[in-house]
Image (cartoon, rainbow, N blue to C red):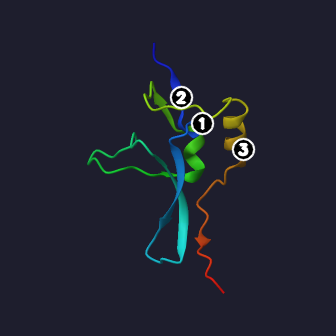
Amino acid sequence: MSEKVYCANCLQCVVVRNYESEQDKYILRVKCNKKKWSKRSGEEKLYKYFTVARRMQTDCEFYEEMGDILPYIKNLKKELPIKDEIYMVKTAS
């Protein structure tokens, strides 16, 4: 029996900073610490932060539930931004 699990409710799903060409700016991305998300080339795939609520796997051997799925996923879909937000690195004053 295969059961789909939401990656956003897994301990292995983490938010990371993704620096573009300017090292003082970054956007948020999501990755799997167990490298379950990969491109055909084998390279690790990062997903947009605001799409994580839709990311699912079937029978993931690394899935570690962090809590009750509802209303968590519903709230994520409602609360996450709908597009990338650019953040600035804070410099020490």
Q: Indicate the secondary structure of the residue bearing disc 1.
A: helix
Q: Name the residue under label 3.
A: 78
Q: Which residue lies furthest to the bottom in this view?
A: 93
Depth check: 5 or 33 in front? 33
Residue 37 place in picture, x, y as percent:
40, 42
Q: Indicate the secondary structure of the residue bearing disc 2.
A: strand
Q: Indicate the secondary structure of the residue bearing disc 3.
A: helix
Location of residue 9 with respect to 18 vertically, above or below:
above
The kind of residue tagged 2 is Val
Query: Which label's residue is closer to the chain start, 3 or 2?
Result: 2
Mark 2 Cα shell of 10 Å, populated few (<14), some (14-19), many (≥20): some
Q: How far apart are marks 1 and 3 (CA)?
A: 15 Å
Residue 58 place in picture, x, y as percent:
45, 26
Query: Which label's residue is closer to the chain start, 1 or 3?
Result: 1
Location of residue 18 with respect to 70 vertically, above or below:
below
Q: Are marks 1 and 2 in contact (CB under 8 Å)?
A: yes
The kind of residue tagged 3 is Lys
Q: Is residue 81 left or right of residue 27?
A: right
Q: Mark 2 points at which residue?
A: 5
Q: Give the residue at x 58% y 40%.
A: 8
